[in-house]
Image: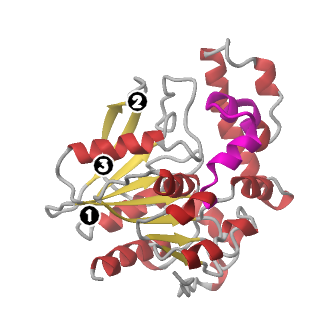
Amino acid sequence: MPVIESTYKPAFYFKNRFVSTVYSGLVRRVKLNQERERITLKDNDFLDLDWSYSTEKTNKIIILLHGLEGNSKRPYITGTAKLFNLNGVDALAVNFRGCSEEDNLSYHTYHSGFTTDLQEVINHVLSKNKYDEIYIKGISLGANLLLKYLGETQNVPKEIKKAIAVSVPCDLYGSCKEISKLKNKPYHDRFLKSLLVALSKKQEKFPDKLTIEAVKSIKNLQDFDNVYTSKAHGFIDAVDYYTKCSALQFLPNIKVPTLIINALNDSFLSPECYPVKEAKQNQELYLEMPNHGGHVGFIDKKNVYYNERRALEFIKTMLNT
């Protein structure tokens, strides 16, 4: 489909990408009651899922996927869940392995292309025989994972009607190089610190798979993916992981109507993360590139973010066509 012209016009002070990104990550608050469910995966590890419900009976649900080192409590997740709950849709916020304040059991955890767990979550939702319409929204890492799933899966369940991907680093290597630049040092170092804390716990539990020296050798995010992510998940190295898991190559195969929202001033995204050609060649892809918004920083009125409102509009519009 042609690229969608965006109508997002934030207040002047939120046009700055640093301000909008930091405010959204550190200042925004959303109150939401969630009920936790723990499911056992096929490999006997677990996932914690946080549910919130519409006030009315519904056969619709949205599955929400967080970003790197995020969780189901982040405002970009709870904000979407709350808006959809108020509009007759249940919400299921996924905590990826190790992201629910309790270390997972396996040596491996999650990554940008680990779609196996998403498929198990979808199967779990379908097993309830309650939902005829499933929507999925992914943020950042979760958005790349979502697009990869939709493009690589031969038989996407018919119940999955729409998808929304926000601030997608769909070229992982390009995005890694961007976030490693000096302009992104505060973000890079914050992510790396969180990842290393979690990795130290893994090293203590699995000393035969990871040495203290290897952990100490990690100085940046690509090092982390070379030392841990790639080896723990069956890739040769970080570049092999980035190459095989980048969603960009899977976009031509997507057959579910999907909205991608990537801000042009997102400092995490490389030029390749704006899939204009792929959107124009696939009638199921809708690409929107607002001038502002930073990384998941689409601040709007009444604490409802633009990407959240657009997700709801996209679903409602598509249901009427």
Residue 302 vs residue 228, the one in the foreground: 228
Question: Can you identify the residue that label 2 sits on?
Answer: 46
Q: Residue 102 in magenta?
A: no
| In the rendered image, the vertical position of residue 216 relative to residue 242, given as above or below | above
| Count of numbered circles in the view | 3
Question: Can you identify the residue that label 3 sits on?
Answer: 51
- What is the magenta range? 224-248
Q: Residues within 10 Å of mark 2 (few under 14, many from 20)?
A: many
- Residue at image position (13%, 61%) is 57
Mark number, residue 89: 1
- Tell me which amino acid carries mark 1: Val
Q: Residues within 10 Å of mark 1 (few under 14, many from 20)?
A: many
- Tell me which amino acid carries mark 3: Trp
Distance between the Cα atoms at labels 2 and 3? Answer: 16 Å
In this view, which residue lies farthest toward the top?
A: 208
Image location (x, y in percent) of residue 250: 57, 58
In this view, which residue lies farthest toward the right?
A: 182
